[in-house]
Image: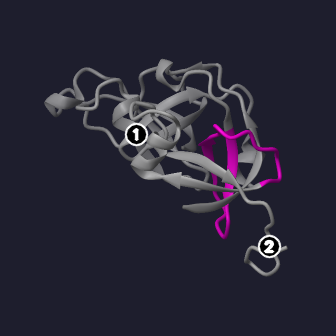
Amino acid sequence: MKICQVEGTLVATARIGSLENRRLLVVKERGSSGKQVAVDPVGCKPGDWVIAVGSSAARDAAGSKDYPSDLTIVGIIDYWDEANGKAGA
Amino acid sequence: MQIHRIVRDLVTTKRNFWLAAKSLRVVEDHRGNLEVALDPIGAKPGDFVITIGLSAARVAAGNPKITTDLTIGGIIDHWDEERWRS
């Protein structure tokens, strides 16, 4: 699983039918510069640190084996201290 | 999923049977690296799109037997180059 920070929502009106009307978020993986798009079944806010799963687990995590996601958010991290790079209160 | 921009169409007349008659697009990422993606929507050059990779690309193509590892999932309504490259 990857540790990512949520940057904001992404609106894509023209999309393939199988993506349904799920919420898509722009996330930045910790320690990398590139942005990625993740499916959000949890309900995150911009700025939240989250854990996201990739590969075929992303499809299951989005709710069904037939859902075309390669990155799905599975949880919001309660406390993340970015300065230390580890979880803690 | 990744954010890509459509560069142009790609025509391959001789192709693998399991690519079927799907349209292909050349897409670039924020660093300018080019890749080829399958396009079930009909995106135009210059459009910013969400691309689905890994095994989900085959599901997104509508048939898990289609041989693709990158499929366009949607056209982004509002996106700009500055946000893309930052």
The quarter of the rendered structure image containing the C terminus of chain B is bottom right
Q: Amino acid at mark 1?
A: Ala
Residue B44 is inside the magenta segment: no
What segment carries the magenta color?
Answer: A25-48
The CA distance from mark 2 to mark 1 is: 31 Å
Please tell me whether residue B72 is drawn above or below residue A34 in the rendered image: above
Please tell me whether residue A61 is drawn above or below residue A51 in the rendered image: above
Q: Say if mark 2 contacts mark 1, CB within 8 Å.
A: no
Left or right of A78, for residue A23: left
Residue A40 is inside the magenta segment: yes
Q: Residue at x 73, y 77 (%)?
A: A86
Q: Amino acid at mark 2?
A: Glu
Tell me residue B6's x, y (percent).
53, 34
Please tell me whether residue B41 is drawn above or below residue B59 in the rendered image: above
Tell me residue B35's x, y (percent).
42, 46
Left or right of A19, for residue A7: right
Q: Residue at x 68, y 41 (%)?
A: A42
Q: Residue at x 48, y 46 (%)?
A: A58
The secondary structure type at the circle numbered 2 is loop
Please tell me whether residue A4 is drawn above or below residue A21 in the rendered image: below
Q: Which mark is residue B56?
A: 1
Q: Residues within 10 Å of mark 2 (few under 14, many from 20)?
A: few
Left or right of B35, for residue A35: right
Tell me residue A6's x, y (percent).
75, 50
Q: Chain of mark 1?
A: B
Residue at image mark 2: A82
B6 or A64: which is nearer to us? A64
To which quarter of the image does residue B74 belong?
top right
Tell me residue A79's x, y (percent).
81, 66
The quarter of the rendered structure image containing the N terminus of chain B is top right
Q: Residues within 10 Å of mark 1 (few under 14, many from 20)?
A: many
